[in-house]
Amino acid sequence: MAKIIAMFNNKGGVSKTTTTFNLGWILAERGKRVVMVDADPQCNLTGMVLDLKQEDALSKFYEENPGRNLKAALEPAFASRPKALAAVDCVEVEGREGLFLIPGHVGVAEDEVSLGIAQQLSESVQTLRNLPGSFTELFKLTAAAYDADYVLIDLSPGLGSINQNLVATADFFIVPASPDVFSVMAMDSLSRVIPRWMNWARNAAELDALQDADYPFPEPRLKFLGTVVQRYRLLGGQPTTAFRSYFDALDDAIDNSLKPAFEKAGVLFEEAKYDSAGLEGSMRLASISDFNTLIAESQKRRKPVFALTKEDLKMRGVVWDQTEQNVEAFRATFTALSEKIEALTA
């Protein structure tokens, strides 16, 4: 059965989408089959996979591919259509065999209110009882159709009902972060939010109305894999002084606030499992510095930095030799990240 991993932080701008894309690619490169889900109404992950250079390219994709996006796939539940949920006809990611995408849709945000009402856990809301379990059912159906090992969900920043559902019903979650004051504050916020969501999910799983639904709400089993810290500059191979101070502040927030709250909520593994997987610092899966212009090139080519070639960058000689070192450093970082994730989710 596929393992569902949510990428979540209620702070924006921490490279959740880039992490999802790069991690999906490296896992597929390592022989895993991966379905990525764009659950962010901004559809940035969809934009990294599809060629959306034309102004109306996304609208044209929806017109030519009815049903091939997250909102349309969920309509049997959310629009009470007289048919059952079915596996999504995913988009195959160009250049990477074994990697697939469920495209996003800006209209997913419109389902927030209906899901929020359904998740108030009132047994009187019989007409909405299929909604809370519909996301998990859709992902399981799609993963089975593609024989997937992993489902990676790219989430929007925010604390709405959709994020609550997708995090609480995932098998695992990763918190991308940046070494800045806002990410430090986000750790404190997550230490309060995640336990509250888990308490809700456990109550939901015991509710007869949701267990008797066409798409039963799953028993929660969420576990925290760790953080991925990125978007910082190096000097002499180390984070600059300003960024280093925020690394220390992040570690303090994780050690003193997030870890105790997550342990009490039951979303942590035993310490020995994290140690054996080789996590850095305080619950850190990886530290990824800025790669400057290479990020722009990877987005332009719709492939990760570590998959960029000399031909992609139109470089040669000494310039390529220096750039190749950065490309390989990025590959080593994501290879190590994927190895840790495979170990923790085994």
Image (cartoon, helix red, strand yellow):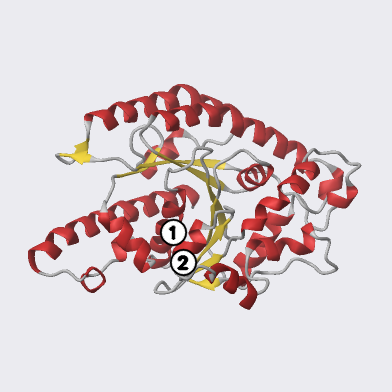
**Image-based side of 272 in relation to 78, left or right:** left
Residue 249 on image: x %, y %: 36, 25
Which of the two discs, 1 and 2, labels the residue nearer the N terminus?
A: 1
Mark 2: give few (<14), some (14-19) or many (20+) Cα within 10 Å: many
Q: Could you tell me which secondary element the residue under label 1 belongs to? A: helix
Q: Amino acid at mark 2?
A: Val
Horizontal side of 314 relative to 220 (left or right) equals: left
Residue at point 86% right, 46% down? 209
**Residue ID at (79%, 40%):** 206
From the viewer's side, name the closer residue of 148 and 271. Answer: 148
Q: Residue furthest top?
A: 256
**Tag of residue 21:** 1
Pointer 1 and pointer 2: residues touching (CB < 8 Å)?
yes
Q: Residue furthest bottom?
A: 64
Residue that sits furthest to the front in the current view: 55
The residue that mark 2 highlights is: 49
* Count of numbered labels shown in the rendering: 2
Q: Is residue 334 above or below residue 33?
A: above
- List x then y, in percent, for residue 125: 88, 45
Q: Residue at x 29, y 26 (%)?
A: 245
The quadrant in which residue 94 appears is bottom left
Q: Secondary structure at mark 2?
A: helix
